[in-house]
Image (spheres, grey):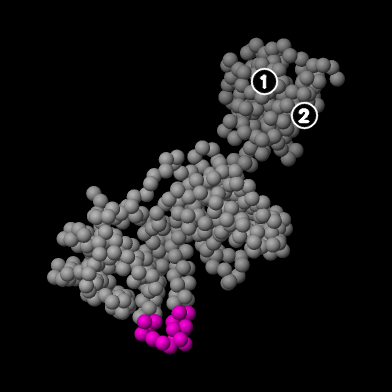
């Protein structure tokens, strides 16, 4: 092989090596032609893709590019037209590398030269095969990306529809559980020194709270719940803590931890910890006989951080993978509710991030979940603290106005408050509550959000207008998309979520009385 032929062979090798990671389809053709000019010492190059009416996929090096439609097909007569155009344009040679796919012609890489020696036929064959393979990979990558984007759109719409339905169902269940828990608190105060009855009531309370936790997860998977404030959270610490838990309690699991970034994000620490645990638990369940769990946290550019959770379990089939993030979908039988990954998806969406799942079915193939979250702003802001003059204490009888339209909930909460030492006035609608407030003297107001005539926000607004210093708690079974500042702006000092735990409910009201009301912000 002569020196020129050896240089050409090396140039072909360098070009194909550069295409080992094909560029995106929109820039693929131009990139291939630029590489051809650089590595193959030709003056210009054009890539045509397709057997019938090939599309000019890219070009480089031309003063005047080949006209559109110059190749009607890859037949000899049409290729001769390309040669004739090249001679008229001042090129002395045109070398053609035929692209094939499944043993059929799939396009041409045309190399135009004004004085170079002809290419060796074997080099053109290798070049055609390599470029055809790169074209196929680029198109496959684009199809995968398009399919993934379509799956995400479909999933988002499905989650939105399910979320709307679930919110209504969750509200009704929360009301029912709230009445049960309220009466449980009343009975616990009445049974006195009767251990058997107290134990039975405590078991009932725990079962009801477990039901409440399930309802809360149903509200969360839709991604619409945001009734907890965001702070600056170091995700790296959460990931390290979860890795330590796995090492301590799962001896058959090899944990590979790589924290390459602090992962400082704006978020809710409790939710982010649950996100990491859900992803890790899902990975561990895929490795019942043991395996390797990989946890990696790394910067993804300047504005994002990426958490990767990978396992060496059995992986998922394509059909299971498509539904893995759907709520209530599970392959683990009735012992699982199918809310884990759906909850994770909801948490990620609430934090403004993205979640991707890759998995192949087969022992050892495993699954890989990648979560991208926006990083927190660089400036750390000191949280505001209540000023001393905002505090308020009460003397004498503690008088409560309770506004609740549901009779069972009204009776349960009124009885619980009375047993806690409060003097209770109850109203069954918003208008009745506003009238009762105007006619009486109260230390605190508790109002339900969903009232038949006027909602709880309106009740709070009218009472605050009459008495800006009055502490007001809003009680709701809905998953609210509000933060602390929004709640304050609308005249509410405390948000109490149904179903309430009778053990903590009275303490919340006592604390509200101690701190006092905050003035609504403008």
x, y percentage for residue 185? 38, 78
Q: Is residue 438 placed above or below 318 in the rendered structure?
A: below
Q: Nearer the viewer, residue 507 or 485?
A: 507
In the picture of the structure, the residue carrying the numbered disc 2 is 125
**Local SS, label 2:** helix
Which residue is at a point 63% across and 42% down the rendered structure image? Answer: 140
- Who is closer to the viewer here, 500 or 120? 500
In magenta, the rendered stretch is 187-203
Identify the image quadrant of residue 508.
bottom left
Q: Residue at horizontal 73%, vertical 14%?
A: 116
Determine the residue positioned at 38% across, 46% down.
Answer: 382
> Badge 2: few (under 14), some or many (20 or more) residues near its Cα, within 10 Å?
some
Nearer the observer, 362 or 335: 335
What's the magenta bit mostly, secondary-structure-wise? helix
Mark 1, secondary structure of its residue:
helix
Q: Position of residue 23 (x, y in %)?
A: 62, 33
- Could you tell which of marks 2 and 1 lies nearer the N-terminus? 1
Q: Position of residue 205 (x, y in %)?
A: 44, 77
Residue 398 coordinates in the image, percent (x, y) = 24, 72
**Does 412 appear in magenta?**
no
The answer to whether the residue labelled 2 contacts the one labelled 1, judged by CB atoms less than 8 Å apart, is no
Q: Is residue 146 left or right of residue 430?
A: right
Which residue is the site of mark 1?
37
209 vs 302: above or below: below
Label 2, label 1: how many angstroms apart (C-alpha)?
18 Å
Q: Is residue 9 left or right of residue 409?
A: right
Position of 334 with respect to 218 (left or right) is: right
């Amino acid at each position: 092989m002569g020196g020129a032929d050896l240089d050409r062979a090396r140039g072909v090798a360098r070009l194909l090596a550069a295409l080992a990671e094909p560029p995106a389809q929109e820039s693929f053709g131009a990139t291939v032609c630029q590489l051809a000019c650089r590595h193959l010492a030709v003056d210009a190059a054009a890539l045509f893709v397709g057997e019938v009416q090939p599309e000019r996929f890219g070009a480089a090096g031309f003063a005047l590019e080949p006209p559109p439609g110059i190749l009607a097909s890859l037949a000899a007569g049409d290729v001769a037209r390309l040669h004739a155009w090249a001679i008229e344009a001042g090129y002395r040679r045109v070398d053609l590398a035929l692209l094939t796919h499944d043993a059929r012609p799939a396009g041409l890489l045309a190399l135009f030269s004004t004085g170079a020696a002809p290419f060796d036929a074997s080099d053109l064959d290798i070049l055609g095969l390599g470029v055809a393979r790169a074209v196929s990979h680029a198109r496959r990558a684009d199809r995968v990306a398009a399919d993934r984007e379509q799956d995400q759109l479909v999933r988002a719409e499905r989650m939105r529809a399910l979320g709307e339905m679930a919110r209504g169902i969750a509200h009704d269940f929360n009301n029912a559980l709230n009445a049960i828990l309220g009466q449980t608190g009343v009975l616990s105060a009445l049974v006195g020194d009767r251990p058997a009855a107290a134990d039975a009531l405590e078991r009932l309370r725990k079962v009801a709270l477990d039901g409440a936790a399930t309802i809360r997860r149903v509200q969360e998977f839709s991604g619409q719940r945001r009734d907890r404030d965001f702070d600056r959270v170091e995700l790296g610490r959460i990931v390290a803590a979860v890795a330590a838990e796995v090492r301590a309690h799962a001896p058959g699991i090899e944990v590979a931890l790589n924290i390459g970034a602090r992962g400082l994000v704006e978020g809710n620490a409790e939710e982010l910890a649950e996100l990491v645990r859900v992803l890790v638990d899902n990975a561990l369940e895929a490795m019942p006989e043991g395996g390797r769990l990989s946890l990696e946290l790394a910067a993804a550019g300047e504005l994002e951080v990426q958490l990767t959770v990978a396992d060496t379990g059995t992986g998922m089939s394509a059909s299971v993978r498509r539904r893995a993030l759907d709520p209530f979908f599970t392959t683990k039988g009735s012992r699982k509710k199918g809310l884990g990954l759906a909850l994770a998806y909801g948490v990620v969406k609430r934090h403004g991030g993205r979640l991707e799942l890759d998995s192949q079915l087969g022992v050892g193939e495993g699954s890989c979940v990648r979560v991208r979250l926006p990083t927190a702003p660089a400036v750390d802001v000191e949280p505001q603290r209540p000023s001393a003059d905002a505090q308020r204490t009460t003397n004498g009888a503690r008088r409560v106005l309770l506004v609740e339209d549901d009779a069972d909930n009204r009776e349960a909460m009124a009885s619980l408050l009375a047993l806690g030492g409060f003097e209770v006035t109850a109203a069954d609608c918003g208008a009745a509550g506003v009238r009762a407030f105007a006619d009486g003297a109260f230390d605190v107001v508790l109002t339900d959000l969903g009232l038949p005539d006027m909602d709880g926000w309106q009740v709070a607004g009218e009472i605050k207008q009459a008495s800006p210093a009055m502490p007001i708690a809003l009680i709701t079974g809905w998953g609210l998309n509000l933060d602390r500042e929004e709640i304050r702006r609308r005249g509410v000092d405390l948000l109490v979520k149904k179903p309430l735990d009778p053990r903590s409910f009275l303490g919340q009201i006592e604390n509200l009385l101690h701190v006092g009301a905050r003035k609504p912000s403008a």
